[in-house]
Image: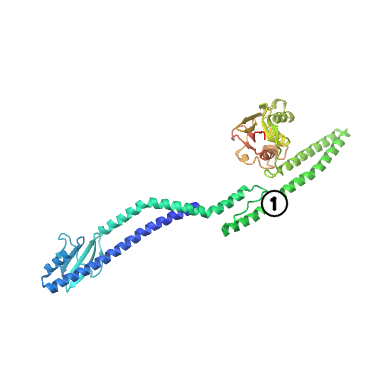
Amino acid sequence: MTRATVLVALAAAFFLATASGLSSRFIFEAQEERILRDSAVALSAAVRRELVEEHVSLADSAQDSIFESGLADDAIEIYKGDTRVASSHAAQLIGLSAPNVVVRSPLWLSITVAIDGDVWLVVASPRDRGERALRIFGWSLLLATPLAILVAVLIGRSAARRVTEPLVAFRDRFIAAGPGQEVGPAPSDDPNEVRELDTAFRAQWQRVRESFDREHEFAANAAHELRTPLTRMMLLAEHAAEGITNKDGRAVLDQQIEEIGRLSRLVDALLVMARSTDSHPVGRDAVNLADLTREAARTLPFEALAVPRIEAPDEALVRGDEDLLRVAVSNLLDNARKFGAAGASPRVEVSTANGRVSLRVITPGSRISAAERDLLFDRFYRGPESRAGQPGHGLGLSLAQHIARLHDGDVSLASVETEDPCFVLDLPTWRPV
């Protein structure tokens, strides 16, 4: 809107300048014609008086009238019939034209009027006189244009800011309100249009809040209600497995226990995902991310030749919930375990710099296509390789990212398509309160 207002101001200035130039030219030429016509009529009357009152010859009276006319810049000619009998400029020839009609030629603006009978007076004004005046006006306009543009820009910006200030304040109120928060009150002096817009957006904002609240509540309640029956199913399956000696029956129960475990982990993940990054603050305890990384590497079932190579200091403290951070770190390492090349050790680096703690997990021998890069952190997304031979629900990376954001951090893919995948968990360093 600011740019549009400035553009309108510039266009208005340009239009006014152009209109002023054209109208000035039209007015100047109309004024020249009127002056020329008046001069011709007055001079013809003077020549007529000379002829009647002084009783002198036409040549003498005409020459005296031309001399006394005071029209030094104009060309004057007097004809009897088609013969020129007097002229203010002997070397110039204007010539007769239709009576009382202003004629425009490339050099002259001329008019022919009758003196008496077949005696004619021709008065001509040089066209370059008007052109000189218009050139002076044009140069004046051109030199004044930068100042006019500057004034137009300043006025346009000032007017646009005054007009858009309520809209900017309206935008800032909604930006400042995070999910689940109330929007700040609108000033009472806002224009009616902005107040109506504010009312409409508040109503829509409330509907969106209620929709998100219902979604989070449903996910949390559903996951919570599922935990109890899943736990009982797990206990019953384990108890039944203890009393079975048949290998086939025991294998079936073991598979059932494994599936129940996977389902339980899914429910736990959904409970975490239901926590909003704005309305559910995490703990404020100091957590040693280096120790969590080493513990996760020992706990996960890595092959003997593919144990992660960890480069980490003794301490890399962050603030947050230790259980949640353990889940995030374990998910990143488990992702490297699943998709790394057989027998290749993932590289894990923990470092502290500029008030941040970074955990880098590099998966050797794997590649992520360009088509997959934008989908990796989508919930329940599983790539072709994962669907073909790896168990899971497609929540590992999205859950790790969500937990990081609960701690004012993030998880991202830091490698390009032709490199080994490198996932980075970035968190703020712990500081004593």
In this rendering, is residue 37 above or below 279? below
On the image, the x and y values in percent for residue 363 come to 65, 31
Q: Position of residue 303 (x, y in %)?
A: 72, 27
Q: What amino acid type should be assigned to the residue bearing mark 1?
A: Ser
Which residue is depicted at the point 63% across and 48% down?
Answer: 177
Q: Is residue 111 left or right of residue 387?
A: left
The residue labelled by disc 1 is 211
Report the residue at 33% width, 60% height from top. Answer: 24
Note whether 169 is above or below 106 in the view shown. above
Q: How is the image coloured?
A: rainbow
For the residue pair 285 and 321, the one nearer the viewer reads as 285
In this view of the protein, can residue 159 be seen by the observer? yes
Q: Is residue 324 left or right of residue 117?
A: right
Which image quarter is the C terminus in? top right
Q: How many marks?
A: 1
The residue carrying pointer 1 sits among few (fewer than 14), some (14 to 19) or many (20 or more) residues within 10 Å by Cα, namely few
Label 1 sits on a secondary structure element that is helix
* Residue 120 quadrant: bottom left
Residue nearest the observer in this picture, 378 or 189 = 189
> In the current view of this chain or complex, which residue is farthest to the left?
56
Q: Nearer the viewer, residue 25 or 118?
A: 25
Q: Position of residue 52 (x, y in %)?
A: 14, 74
